[in-house]
Amino acid sequence: MKENEFDIYVRDLMAGAEESVSPDVWKGVEAGLDKASVRRRVPVWVWRGIAGVAAAAAVAAGVFFLVPEQNLSNQPTIQTVAQATDDEPLPADSLPEEDIVPVEKQASRLQGRYAYVLETPVVEMPDEPVTATATTETETQQRQGGSIIAPARSDDHFSADDEALRKLAFEEHKTHRRGHYSVGIAGNLQSNTRPQSPASTIRRSAGMYAETLPSQPGIFGEHPEFSFGLPFSAGVSFRYDFSPRWGVGTGLVYTNLTRSFMAHYMQPDMKPVYDREVTNQQHYLGIPLDVYFNIVNTGFWNVHVRMGGMAEKLIDNHFLIQHSAGDIHLHETVDPLQFSTGVGVGLEFKFTPYLGIYLDPTLRYYFDNGQPRSLRTIQPLRFDIEAGLRFTLGR
């Protein structure tokens, strides 16, 4: 018999052990109690404790010397609240076989006496081939009352969320990578003020105020301008924002400059006409190149800094000379290009994701490139305001 099997047997046997006492012993005990009660009454629980200890000692001695070795490997066991003790194994041939009480009878006694005995039902399972299956902790916890609750599969939910996040990240990546295009329709106005100083008479063309007559038809002897028209520009701009912060832009801009003055005119038949009112209109066509830095770029507002330059070509320098015989039209061309540079701060408000209005005040400087007399040549540092509509085409 193995040591652990014997320990189990002894523990089960001791759980309900009792030893009967002969009537003579109890009569002696009662006689002694009666005598002791006259002098000093001893509590009953003391005697009961002494009797219980004596009975337990007698049973332990009987088990130790009388219980033989038996094979209990096939005997069912009964689990009680009694704690297991590490007792020394008893000799296998100490008890005669006829004094052994069957375990079934002991179990029936214990079940009637102790209500807190825990019974472990034995469930016989059919013989089936054993297969190794992996069971998660969640599935094990959800097996209740002989039924298995199917675990909530969150993989589908997580996979859907992951797929949505991947799509969002991909769209954001495409947005930052591709940027977005916009087209603007704008108008530009400048003031027509000029400095009241001798500088207003400088940088005039050759032959002005000439006392000698010119050798070919044309205007000569110009007097200072008595009026300037408002410089006006209009055009179409194309802008590409390649990142949320940076963008570039270009376009096509038409500009009209006007002035009025008194001058002389030499006719084609070489007959001079003196002191005529002349209106000069200059028509420029330019291509700007700007760089934008977005300071604020939200859903409805865009605040940016614009830096860049522009090259303009004078496509027509038109003079209208008033004459009693009829108005005279004179057209001239100029080969050099007009270059300028500017910097400004712009503001845009979007009514919708595809339409907005913007305002770009700009401080611009015009270089001396041999252009005909105009407000730009008199005062090259100008302040202009560009305003218009901007349409966002997409990404």
Image (cartoon, rainbow, N blue to C red):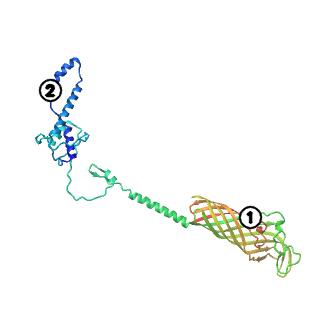
Disc 1 + disc 2, Cβ < 8 Å: no
Q: Residues within 10 Å of mark 2 (few under 14, many from 20)?
A: few
Going by the numbered disc 2, the residue's amino acid type is Val
Furthest residue in direction left, as rendered: 98
Residue behind mark 2: 25
Q: Is residue 154 above or below residue 27?
A: below
Q: Give percent across and percent down for residue 2.
A: 20, 48
What residue lies at 52% left-to-right and 63% top-to-bottom? 172
Furthest residue in direction top, as rendered: 38
Report whether 99 appears left or right of 123.
Answer: left
Going by the numbered disc 1, the residue's amino acid type is Arg
Residue behind mark 1: 382
Q: Give percent across and percent down for residue 19.
A: 16, 33
What residue lies at 17% left-to-right and 23% top-to-bottom? 30
Q: Give percent across and percent down for residue 370.
A: 77, 73
Q: Secondary structure at mark 1?
A: strand
